[in-house]
Amino acid sequence: MDALFVVFALTVALVPCSVFASDPSSLQDFCVAIDDPRFAVFVNGKFCKDPELATANDFFLAGLQIPGKTANKVGSNVTQANVAQIPGLNTLGISFARIDYAPYGLNPPHTHPRASEILTVLEGSLYVGFVTSNPVNRLISKILNQGDVFIFPVGLIHFQFNVGHTNAVALAGLSSQNPGTITIANAVFGSKPPISDDVLMKAFQVDKSVIDKLQAQFWMNNK
Ligand SMILES: *[C@@H]1O[C@H](CO)[C@@H](O)[C@H](O)[C@H]1NC(C)=O
């Protein structure tokens, strides 16, 4: 057999694997396997209600016209509409959020481990951006005005900053029933228990006093 035939035969043999073999997407941070189902609490997602018993309210949420309070350190507030608020979203792979920004309010750099995001500005002007993965770490950013739409690809660190002197409001669709949020500063400097100074000093190339100062901040949970 010549080498080209071997490559061709292997390619043909592997195609069905790449098409059919796939684990289900993760719907939560992790799902540790156990042998005894009596101790099981979660499946990957939520348990399903008998469809006969489903009601309109399982697919409904009121109140997204109400602004979240932005009187906090970062000047923003995320109101979520995911499977935790709307049980009918279970297994459907989508969710929604309203984000309010005070003047110069920031939705701080964060990632959604399980979702891409499509965001539109209802009011105000936002400076938004995301950073591509290593090794390039390119910032892709733009000023958005009312009616503009922007995408944050799954897993990438992104932010929105209100650059106007008025309140701003945005709506976001997310490609998971439970997108998850990792706010970078909170996760790195506000973890419980804290990450050791030695790790953070080396990672950020700064002195212990700088790390201690950052760890002493009150890291607000903005979802
Ligand atoms: C966001 O707004 C809600 C509703 O006004 C409020 O209960 C909550 O405390 C606010 N969260 C933050 C982090 O400010």
Image: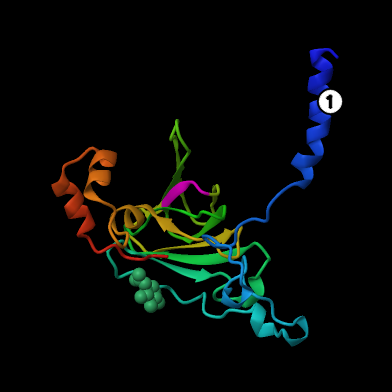
> Where 162 sits versus 77, above or below?
above
If the image is split into quadrants, where does the N terminus sit? top right
Does residue 188 sit above or below 141 in this rendering? below
Residue 187 or residue 146, whichever sits in front: 187
Q: Along the line of sight, which residue is nearer the eye, 180 or 32?
A: 32
Residue 74 in the image: above or below residue 51: above
Q: Residue furthest left?
A: 209
Mark 1: which secondary structure? helix
Determine the residue located farthest toward the front in the rendered image: 35
Front in this rendered view, residue 5 or 148: 5
Residue 69 visible somewhere in the drawing: no
User: What residue is at 46 percent from the left and 44 percent from the top?
Assistant: 130
Which quadrant contains ligand 1? bottom left
Residue 88 position within the rendered picture, expressed as x and y whole percent measured from the top left: 66, 75
**Is residue 124 left or right of 150 when viewed as pictured?**
left
The residue segment tinted magenta is: 155-159
Q: Position of residue 161 (x, y in %)?
A: 37, 53
Residue displayed at 23% across by 45% down: 198
- How packed mark 1 is, by other alpha carbons closer than 10 Å (few <14, some 14-19, many 20 or more), is few
Q: Is residue 55 visible?
A: yes
Residue beneath label 1, please? 9
In this picture, residue 151 sits left or right of residue 6: left
